[in-house]
Amino acid sequence: MELSKTFDSKAAEQRWFQLWIDRGYFTADPDQPGEAFSIVIPPPNVTGQLHLGHALNVTLQDIIVRMRRMQGYNTLWVPGTDHAGIATQNAVERDLAKEGKNRHQLGRDKFEQRVWEWRETYGNRILNQLRRLGASCDWSRERFTLDEGLSRAVNEVFIRLYKQGLIYKDRKLINWCPRCETALSDLEVDHKEQRNGTLWYIKYPLVDGSGYIEVATTRPETMLGDTAVAVNPEDNRYRAMVGKNVRLPLIGREIPIIADSEVDSAFGTGAVKVTPAHDFNDFEIGRRHHLEEISVMDTRARMNENAGPYAGLDRESARKRILNDLKSAGLYEKEEKHTNNIGTCSRCDTIVEPMLSEQWFLNVKQMAEKAIAAVRDGRTKFFPRFWENTFFNWMENIHDWCFSRQLWWGHRIPAYRCQRCDHLMVTAVRPPKCEECEGTDLKQEDDVLDTWFSSGLWPFSTLGWPAPTRDLERYYPTSLLVTGFDIIFFWVARMMMFGLEFTGEVPFRDIYITPLVRDAEGKKMSKSKGNVVDPLELMDTYGTDALRFTLAQLAVQGRDVILSPDRLNASRAFANKVWNAARFTMGNLADAPQPIPKVDASQMSLADRWILDRLNDAIREITTAIDRYEFNVAAMKVYDFIWHEFCDWYIELSKDALKAGDPRQAAGRYVIIHGFDQMLRLLHPFMPFVSEEIWSVIRPYIDEADLAPNLPIAKFPAPREEHALNHAEALAMRHLIEATEAVNSLRALVEIHPGKSVNAIIRPRIGGNGDSHAGFATDLGRFRN
RNA sequence: AGGCACGUAGCUCAGCGGGAGAGCACUUCCCUGACACGGAAGGGGUCGGCGGUUCAAUCCCGCCCGUGCCUACCA
């Protein structure tokens, strides 16, 4: 069969992927033998499209999954997508806005329908993009976090946690996004340093007319909700004032001066205004001292009726007016530059407002302790190891999780309230009547769950939990999780907690944390910077194999991946190199395809046995590197063996031996085809398409004994000891290589210095008297001629 | 404020106790029947700085400088 001069990646990609699917190579069967190896994919959001982060994540998973499958493991890789509550809702709302509509005009049902349509389009798009990368997932087991089955798991978990008293509803201070108009968890708030912030000093007059107490604040607009002024009990400046009242400027309410040891005397004036309804610290002080909690803003962060004359103003305008009015009243002292942190919504960047609100919470303390223990005793291991510190750090300081969201897209909370007696029933299906008063007017909670609540169940909900399925029994706990560090808290931690709580086992044995992909300048890719590279374009230009190989090569543990066109070019050249090695090999085999019979090691030349020895070495190194998730090491070794050993040396050395009539031909043919076969299998996890394409061509030449059905499930190579070289042989080969290089070196020197003797060229380069070296060089010179 | 990671050739990065490496870029030569997405030969580095441990340090320890990231209720 004739091979074209260059490898046509696109045609191969389509042909082979389809064939793999058609033949069911990726479909897992729990009833087949083999130790289980399972991975659940981190489900991509249905909002977006494939970016390089996904490409890296999926490539690494595919490499290990393909290798395990070839090693004979009973392999399952579950694919799927995440409904991504707030992110998707925002995306669809933006889409609606283009038509001049908003969700409230549509109503909840119509809006939800619209999001389902969106999910249909974009969810499928991203899954196709994963397939384009060659992801060998079991596509027949595709899941979606809002599927019926997964929703059942969500309800089950909710109800069990509620019954255990871990889920509760409470009116507390929470993070609120005034644009998304929903509660957020602590994790969904980004903290940004504000360098040009201001600290304002304001005088609060004492009610008894004995003067003022001065407070410093960064948020004067919240003073309308002040219910105390606090000082440190040790602070002598204020000791006499504790217990007195002050009159809140502008609105005249009387509030007490209290003592609380949390107040830092060294900051500002040492006296702090206390606004329990708009500041987390103040909320704590307020609860300690039983202060009133006065909320002065509405859900869009506009001043509400409690703000008196400022009602209706937004936060910024209210601040300006208040500062002006304080100046007019002579109660404004001064301002200072002050650097502080402000919290913003991680989804829309709006400044988050601490708000007093009734929300659902999950007490995670005990679950967190179990998760910590599981990592401490090694039931689950992080790679690289240092991420464990990050995990512990957060888990040890974990707070209750505010998981209810005032959104429309997500799992609606399975709780019903009787409209007559206000009784609350937590149950998966709507009860016929109130269990207290028998009233029939029951209303389901409007809120939905934080999207991470359902993805936190992903490793077992996708396998059928709570039903005791065969998949669960066979494939859970999963073997490995491959994900980014940015969702260790959001996702990994929650899966650990839920997994241990509901299955009694860790959800995965190993966690491999992938590096972050950056652009050629080392900048983090983001849409706003406009430096996002589309992996699809890269696959079009360089081929999927080249993209995959490049990503694997750069995937160094604990280091960011910086992708450059140079690297991609090199990988594409590598694919081509392998392709051309195949062309050479094919040209040296018998015309009629027939299996090349196995040749005993004793019949082989030194070069034959050397390359098989090197192959053994490569197999060992590549296998252990992937076992350790050192993808870069494995990829480099594949590259080095194929290019610098097989092509540079073995093919060159075998050219003569493969000629017709040469006594070494039979052995040479066997070794080159056998070596090639093994080499392709090593390459396959990294570059599935070229390897499969070539393999399909050389397959007829491979001896029956070595044949396996097809590459995706062909056996991964194992070292063969009969090919090992002894010390003297290895030395002889090394000397041959070194001598060849020396001769080439000399040849080049002679060409650069025409007319000069070899001695004249060598002597000055060696230094000393150089006699012995020069003699050697002279010999080489003769050898050359 | 604390924590983590990283500083090795022009660029992007491997290596991590005893020979300084790869890819790309650069210089010279070669379209030799697998491959110019190729081949051959080269130039280029006080392995961030300063101390310490060691017979021996790019690699271990300490401090410093620089870069990036994460966590944190200082108004």
Image (cartoon, grey):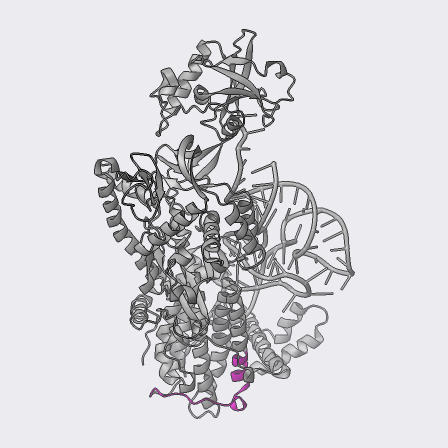
Residue A254 horizontal side relative to residue A592, left or right = right
Q: Position of residue A608 (x, y in %)?
A: 51, 84
Give the residue furthest to the front.
A437
Residue A197 coordinates in the image, percent (x, y): 49, 26
Residue A536 at what x, y percent from top left?
33, 57
In the image, is residue A599 above or below residue A185?
A: below
Farthest-out residue, top: A209
Viewer-nearest residue: A733 or A437 = A437
| Relative to A150, A676 lies left or right | right
Q: Quadrant of residue A483?
A: bottom left
Is residue A305 shown above or below A115? above
The spot of residue A184 in percent (x, y) is 41, 38
Measuring 69% from the left and 68% from the top, which residue is drawn there? A767
* Residue nearest the viewer, comparing A247 with A75: A247
- Please identify the quadrant where the C terminus of chain A is shown: bottom right
**A193 vs A614, nearest the viewer:** A193
Front-most of residues A535 and A729: A535
Depicted A182 relative to depicted A60: above or below: above
Residue A419 picture quarter? top left
The residue shown at (39%, 70%) is A30
- The answer, for residue A90, to whether it is visible in the render is yes
**Can the viewer see residue A533?**
no
Residue at point 25%, 52% (across, down): A121
Q: Is residue A358 magenta?
A: no
Q: Is residue A604 magenta?
A: yes
Q: Is residue A768 left or right of residue A413?
A: right
Q: Which segment did they paint magenta? A: A592-613
Total count of labels:
0
Question: If the image is split into quadrants, where does the N terminus of chain A sit?
Answer: bottom left
